[in-house]
Amino acid sequence: MISSVARAADRGVYYLASPLKRGFGSIKQELEETVSKKYSIHPFKNGLDTGNVLAVTRKYLAMSEAFPYIQAGAYHGLIMRVIHQNSSISRKMEQTFVVGSFLSWDETGGNYLIREEGISALPKILDTKRHFHASYLKADLKYIWGEDIKPDYCPDTRECLVTLSRKLGSSNHLERCAMMVAFEMHAGQMIEALWKSLSRTLWLEPDRLQYFKMHVGGDDPGEEYHIQLTQKLINSIVPGSKRKEFVFLFEEGYKLNIDWCNALCKDKINRYK
Ligand SMILES: [Fe+2]
C-alpha cells in the first residue's frame, strides 16, 4: 500500500484520500474538503531554504520531543474534576483517553517493539535514546548536521504546545476529539512536506532519514494508522446535531498547527546555540 499522503504530496497537493474514502462517513469527507480547500500546500513545502532549515528543524524537534508528554498529561484536569466532584468517567472520556494513550505509547516506540518482538521485548522500552520517535529524529538530525542538535522551545513553539495541551485536555469532548483528528491529519501532511523539503534543500537521500520513512514512507507507514484511529473516534464522539461545531473546532485545531509551521518558516536566521 502506497501512502495516500505520499501520493498526494508527490503531486504537490495534499488530500487525505484513502482514510476518508473508506466509508467512515460524511463528516470526514467535509474535513478532507476543508483541508484541501484551505491548506492544500503545506508551509514546509516551499518555506524551507538553507537560511532557515536548521532553525526550523530545532523547533520541529522540540514539538516532536514534547508531544507525547503533552498528550499523556492532557487528562490530569479531567480526572481531578471527576475525583473532586465524586462523579464518574464517561465513555467519551474513556474513548479519547485510550486513543491518546496509544499515541503516547506509540511515540515511545513501545508499540513497535511489542508488535515486532512480543511482550518479552518490554524491558527494551527503557532504551529511550534509541526507541522514542524523537530519538529517531535526533539521530537523523545528527546525520544531517554532523553533531547533536538541541531542541528549540522558541516562543511560537511554546505557545502552540500550551494551546495544544489545553485543547487535548478540554472538558468538551468535541474539542478533544477535533484536536486529536486535526493533529494527526496535519502531522501526515507536515512530515511528508518536511521530508521532501529537507531532502531537496540539503541534497539528502530521503530513505536515509529513518524518522520520516517510518512515519510516512514505505508500504505501510505508521502515520496513516494514527489518522484512521483518531478519525474513527468521530463516530462515537460526534452526534449529527454537533457536526457544525465539530468541523469548526477541527478547523481551529488544524489552523493552530499550520500557523505554527508558518511562524517557523518566517524565522530566516540560522541560529544555533
Ligand atoms: Fe511519531
Image (spheres, grey):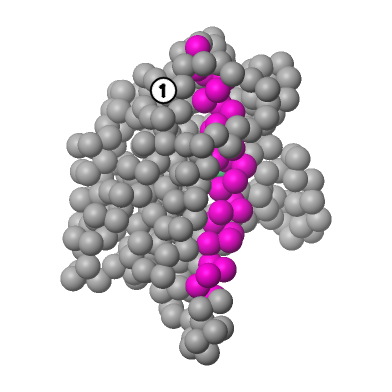
- Main SS of the magenta segment? helix
Tell me the amino acid under the disc marked 1.
Lys
What x and y, as percent, mark residue 1? Answer: 43, 38
Residue 247 in the image: above or below residue 184: below
Per the rendered image, the range of residues in magenta is 51-79
Identify the image quadrant of residue 17.
Answer: top left
Residue hosting label 1:
266
Answer whether residue 192 is visible to the viewer in this image.
Answer: no
Identify the image quadrant of residue 173.
Answer: bottom left
What x and y, as percent, mark residue 260? Answer: 42, 36
Answer whether residue 139 is visible to the viewer in this image.
Answer: yes
Is 69 inside the magenta-drawn segment? yes
Residue appearing at x 42%, y 48% in the figure = 183
Q: Is residue 186 left or right of residue 33?
A: right
Please tell me which residue lies in front, 272 or 112.
Answer: 272
In the picture as drawn, the residue positioned furthest to the front comes out as 155
What x and y, as percent, mark residue 104? Answer: 59, 55
Please tell me which residue lies in front, 120 or 263.
Answer: 263
Residue 1 in the image: above or below residue 205: below
In the picture as drawn, the residue positioned furthest to the bottom comes out as 86
Residue appearing at x 66%, y 49% in the figure = 108
What is the secondary structure assignment of the residue under circle 1?
A: helix
Please tell me which residue lies in front, 136 or 62.
Answer: 62
Q: In what quadrant does ligand 1 lie?
A: top right
Is 40 inside the magenta-drawn segment? no
